[in-house]
Amino acid sequence: MSTKPTAYTPHPMEKRVLLRDHLGVDFTQLENYLSHGGFKMWQKAMELGRDGVLAEVKASGLRGRGGAGFPTGMKWSFLPKDERPRYLVVNADEGEPGTFKDRYFLELDPFRQLEGILIAAYTINAHVSYIYIRGEYWKSKAVTEDAIAQLYKAGWLGKNIQGSGFDLDVYMQTGAGAYICGEETALIESIEGKPGMPRLKPPFPANIGVFGMPTIVNNTETLAAVPVILEMGGETWANLGTPKNGGTKLVGVAGHVKTPGLFEVPMGASMRDVIFNLGGGITDDREILAIIPGGSSCPFLTKDEIDVAMDFDGLKPVGSMLGTACITVMAEGLTDLLTVMQRVTAFYQHESCGQCTPCRQGTGWLKAIADKMDEGLGEDEHIDLLISACNQIEGNTICAHGEAAAWPIRSIAKKFRPQLEAAIRQRATAHGYVAKPLAAHPAA
Amino acid sequence: MSEPVAFSAATNTKIAELLGRYPRKQGALIPTLYLAQDEFGWLKPEVMQLVADKLELPLASVLATAMFYTMLYKKPVGRFHVQICTNVSCYLLGSDELMAIAQQALGLAPGESTPDGLFTLEAVQCLCACDRAPTLQINKDDYFKVTPAKFKELLAQLKTDGVKLGPPVGWLADQHHAHA
């Protein structure tokens, strides 16, 4: 399991409190984790007590790093005050296209998340935690399972942890290739051994979750931040970011950039700076064609929409969202937007669980229209049909998969209409059809 | 139904351990299906029945779950399961060329297996290593920043290895079974 990482100097724009691969230490080994201050925050949590930890997490303003940005402290305090057993479920089902952040903790720094799990489980008084890792993450699964075994052996999991009187069992659970299981209620169904079909809410998992019991579902990055918050204090963490968006955020840059990678910046960092400084600028110094800000569920951005703050509120002015904060850059001249649209529609169609008609049928329609355009049979009106289908999916489904499918496609159809119209003609010609002349657009 | 199937002693021990993790037996279903798949290659009907019996579940519950998840195999998979990401980030950095290379070298369309049981080719969704695109997975191993030249070399190597290793357990019998 042991790897030999090499040390390096991070970019000066970064603010690293979570990422530490640059230290060149193998953090998959418990002894190295412990010798770098590991599990000190578990001791501190015991001193602070449950209310004390909750107060720090609330003061930190930590918001869920899975993409939704719900305040973590508030979520923890929603648990009913009854005697039923509670569960802590970790959402490590990273699958949002374009995203590669939780993989870091799962493969390279597994104990950080596990210390967070220990503290969170103690705070909410859960004695069983399931870490749900996506099926394709074979290395993550192996590293995490090994880390859990190391903790049991050293008395950091099981009964009476380090003499504290607190018991916790942590089990790794694995997904099996269904993107929808990243949705928290689908994930719960999957842990129960069922098809991953999202549940209607309410009841919320805090009341009726896994095996019918009160359950807190937190993302990997969220839990990994918990020990760091206790170490620096909730308020200090909050002050790292922008108001209502405390702390730092892992951000990814991929696609047509010179130095793709995973970085850590204060919440609210400029997206332009992230792309041009951390990402090193665009391949061959080309123009940006389009940007996906945080996974393909987010509405696409044009090159004029990247002067935004990367936090959970900063992308509202451009009609998009932070999502997972892993950016995909598409360069002018290197990207065929119709192909991109086709891949996105194919993805959401394939991953729809099939439960709600608007999503099951609507994602099929989106894919069919995109395919038709690609086969040279597209008409300009099909762009309006795409928008119409998106409007009929959005808001009409049990879970957010409907929105995730509709938003990116509608943003392409609306913001990149000239590119789509050109692509429709290019495909028609390529397939030997006679392309219609471009209609004059009032807006053009 | 063909010859009866049974779990090895080692798998039975693992299943017993899994059952201790959940308040209901069905919780152990997906991990048990993975174990079954490791042992028998894929989830043929009698294996599904075996799992149902083991976990005391209706066969319908086992089938419903198995059918839902793409990584639980409902048909035989070759010795080398070549899974190429075709989603956006990998498309941007050349995954279509990798797919064309694989199709040509293996003589397969996505979703197909070679008759000798050595290769299955599949187009898969985002493997979430976009900073190291294009990516692919062969069985449980990740390959990042795959260039056409490296991929051609890799496929040639696997073809050589495949001749030595042969098809996975019970491939010929299962092929017959799958198409019967």
Image: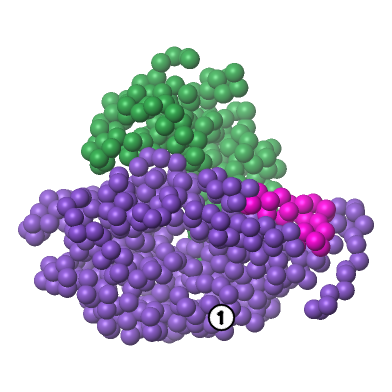
Chain colours: A purple, B green
Q: Amino acid at mark 1?
A: Pro
Foreground residue among B31 and A407? A407
Residue drawn at the location 42% of the way across and 26% of the way down: B59
Residue A152 image offset from top left, x and y in percent: 18, 51
Residue drawn at the location 32% of the way across and 77% of the way down: A61
Principal SS element in the magenta part? helix
Count of all numbered marks drawn on residues in the image: 1
Secondary structure beneath label 1: helix
Residue A1 image offset from top left, x and y in percent: 33, 53
Q: Which residues are magenta?
A: A362-383
Question: Vertically, is B2 above or below B44?
Answer: above
Residue drawn at the location 58% of the way across and 51% of the way down: A359
Foreground residue among A3 and B115? B115
Q: Is residue A123 left or right of residue A100?
A: left
Foreground residue among B89 and A61? A61
Q: Determine which residue is flagged by label 1.
A: A317
Residue A245 image offset from top left, x and y in percent: 39, 79
Question: Vertically, is A372 above or below B51?
Answer: below
Please rate how many residues cluster around mark 1, counting C-alpha atoms within 10 Å: few if below 14, some from 14 to 19, many from 20.
few
Residue A21, by quadrant, is bottom left
Q: Does A367 appear in magenta? A: yes
